[in-house]
Image (cartoon, rainbow, N blue to C red):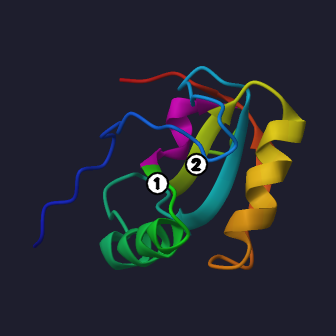
């Protein structure tokens, strides 16, 4: 089984010029994959979503949805953010949609480890 850096936070600088913060209340969700007990990480799905985000010049962030206040439990999440404002997230959402068509903005707070 291949090791995947779930929970690895890569320092981000978002193309809108706004530095990302793990505490930012808005996130662009590029992938959300069922993992009800967090025991069966969806490695391949997370990898594909992360690569799609990278193709558009952004750095993905992945972790379990349960580590985000405001997200539904039981998913592996690939996200970009956090953004201080919804408008900033929406600006980058439009750019990312070229590489990841089914993305959306979600409000939530990253709780970390």
82 lies left or right of 90:
left
40 lies left or right of 36:
left
Please give the name of the residue rendered at 46% of the width and 45% of the height, measured from the top-left corner: 64
**Callout 1 touching callout 2 (CB < 8 Å):** yes
The quadrant in which residue 106 appears is top right
Please give the name of the residue rendered at 58% of the width and 66% of the height, measured from the top-left corner: 31
Image quadrant occupied by the N terminus: bottom left
Image quadrant occupied by the C terminus: top left
Residue 87 locus on image (x, y percent): 89, 39
Q: Which residues are magenta?
A: 62-69
Residue 52 locus on image (x, y percent): 50, 75
| Count of marks, rendered view | 2
Q: CA distance from mark 1 to mark 2?
A: 5 Å
Please give the name of the residue rendered at 56% of the width and 24% of the height, measured from the top-left corner: 21
Q: Residues within 10 Å of mark 1 (few under 14, many from 20)?
A: many
Q: Earlier in the sequence, mark 1 or mark 2?
A: 1
């Amino acid at each position: 089984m291949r090791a995947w850096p779930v929970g690895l936070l890569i320092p981000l600088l978002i193309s809108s010029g706004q530095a990302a913060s793990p505490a930012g209340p808005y996130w662009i969700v590029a992938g959300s994959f069922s993992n009800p007990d967090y025991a069966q990480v969806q490695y391949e799905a997370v990898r594909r979503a992360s690569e799609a985000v990278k193709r558009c010049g952004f750095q993905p962030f992945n972790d379990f949805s349960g580590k985000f206040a405001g997200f539904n439990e039981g998913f592996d999440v690939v996200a970009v953010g956090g953004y201080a404002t919804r408008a900033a997230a929406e600006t980058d959402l439009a750019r990312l949609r070229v590489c990841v068509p089914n993305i959306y903005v979600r409000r939530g707070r990253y709780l970390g480890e």
